[in-house]
Amino acid sequence: MPPATGLAFYRKKQTLENLSSEQPQSLQSVYTIVRDSIAGILDHVTSLEHAYYGPEGSLEAEVQHWMPIIHRVIRPARFSDLISRAQLDAIADRVQDVTDKIAVTEDEVREVYECVNKALNSVRQGMREDIDLLEKLLEFVGRYCRSFSPPEGESLLETATNYEKQLREMRRAVSINLRNILLTVDKFEKETLKIHQFDFVMKEAGEKAGCSQAAFLLIFPAACHHLRNACRGLEMWLDADAAYADYLRLDIEDLVQKRALQARVVQQYVTSAGEHEHRIKNISREIAASGKELTRLLPKQKNLAKEERGLRDENHDVLVDLDIKEYRRQEMRILGHDDSDAYSALLKEIDVLRKRRPAIDRKLKELGIKQSMIEEKRTRCQSLARELEAARADLRGSRRAARKAEVEMEKIDACLQRLREILRLKTSSETLKKIFHNLPLTSLHPASHTGRRTRKDRLQSLCQIVAKAIDGDWVRLYQALLFHPPRGTQIILNDVDDICTRFMRHSMDEQAAQSLAKALCQERLTTTTTHTGERECMNELEREHECK
């Protein structure tokens, strides 16, 4: 390979003719070529106007010059306006007819023919090259100045979709202006042409100039107007295309910031879900401990209830005996036996009964305190159960919110990737090369599909079908599976907790698929004895599931 000389290699300046045979040097060269061509067209239109109207002429002067002659031709023929060439041909035939006494001379008809031919030929012959050149420019601009986006899409791709809509509108507007240049000529020659058939600008100009009765006088100025509109539309297209990449970069920066904010939102929801999960585990442990304690206290509670019933019966008996003895005491006092030995013995018995009541009440109070403590533990356990349900509801809400936020972030990532791809296509020189050679802009065989496609495992396919069918009942299915060798209840519960923890932000069918994959892995582990083999089996199944 010869050594580099350090001299820069500059290609010759490209022209519009070169674009048909070689690829553009850059998008900027396309802009330059098109703008130079548009400037040439506008200069040619100006020169055509000077040749048509004269150095100091205008539409008003042209109308003032020709309208008297036109009136002298159409009024004797009882026409209010001149709307077609056939109408002028009919007047000429009447002038040639010696039997028709129309007051129009051949010179007057010939002058009107000259006016008509001047307008029509100035458009057909004088603007033919401009029209062809504009159509060619429209083709090149539409070919190289693309948006690389469909007109409809995500709201985050608004710049690209709006630009595509704008391109289509500008293409349509330029095409309509080019079609309208010769449309008025064809209408006057083959049909009829009236002033209301022009657009608003030319209609207003014609009415102001006073050529409403000879609309063909607007053919040339309308053609110049449409040529300038077509050139203006192409210039707007080039301006929009030149700023398109800058707007894409701004959108990418905005999406990067939005993704960072969305990532924080996702992290907050994930953290919240983790906190709720930790809270659920703590509450579950407290409920389990309270349940064991209540189970242990249940015989004691029964004994306390039995003892309470005995004390209440004893208290009732004491109260009955005390009432009876009080009644006897009052009778003895009424009868005057209050100084007898029996009365003294009765007072002693009443005093003993009265002393027994506080002891019974104290024991009942102690029993009530013990029973209330057990009841508080039971109420606490019920309260924990309600808290557990509320925590599970909060966990489900946090997982749903986290998944929703993740979906939004995935959409942002997809739009960000799409915008970067559009920007790459817009700024890469390879894009112009592919467009010139009619090659696909994206690879037909992406890197992710270049490897050998593996045959889909039928068992994995069936597991996927089952996972979608059982959805939220996968826990019951996993507990009912017949593992070989058999697995303990605690191990199965640990497996369920592990799947719920690792895939808490996934859907139920995804968790079901993971449970079936874990069960399948346990079956395959029967042929292995080392922990390394188990880890390899798990990794293999996870890779298979991710590939699906």
Image: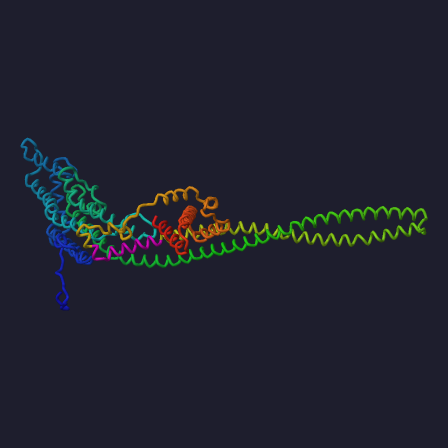
| Nearer to the camera, 39 or 532 | 532
Q: Position of residue 509 (x, y in %)?
A: 42, 46
Which residue is pictured at 46% across the width and 57% down the height?
271
Q: Position of residue 133 (x, y in %)?
A: 14, 50
| Nearer to the camera, 530 or 236 | 530
277 is within the stretch colored magenta:
no
Q: Position of residue 439 (x, y in %)?
A: 19, 50
Colour approach in the figure: rainbow
Tell me if 220 is positioned left or right of 262 in this view: left
424 is within the stretch colored magenta:
yes
Report the span colored magenta. 412-431
User: Which is the main secondary structure of the residues drawn in magenta?
Assistant: helix
Quadrant of res 257: bottom left
Tell me if 26 is positioned left or right of 533 in this view: left
| Nearer to the camera, 435 or 48 | 435
Tell me if 310 is positioned left or right of 77 in this view: right
Label count reads: 0
Quadrant of res 30: bottom left
Which residue is pictured at 69% across the width and 54% down the height?
369
| Nearer to the camera, 128 or 541 | 541
> Considering the image in quadrants, where does the N terminus appear?
bottom left
Q: Position of residue 386 (x, y in %)?
A: 56, 50
Q: Is residue 193 above or below residue 19?
A: above
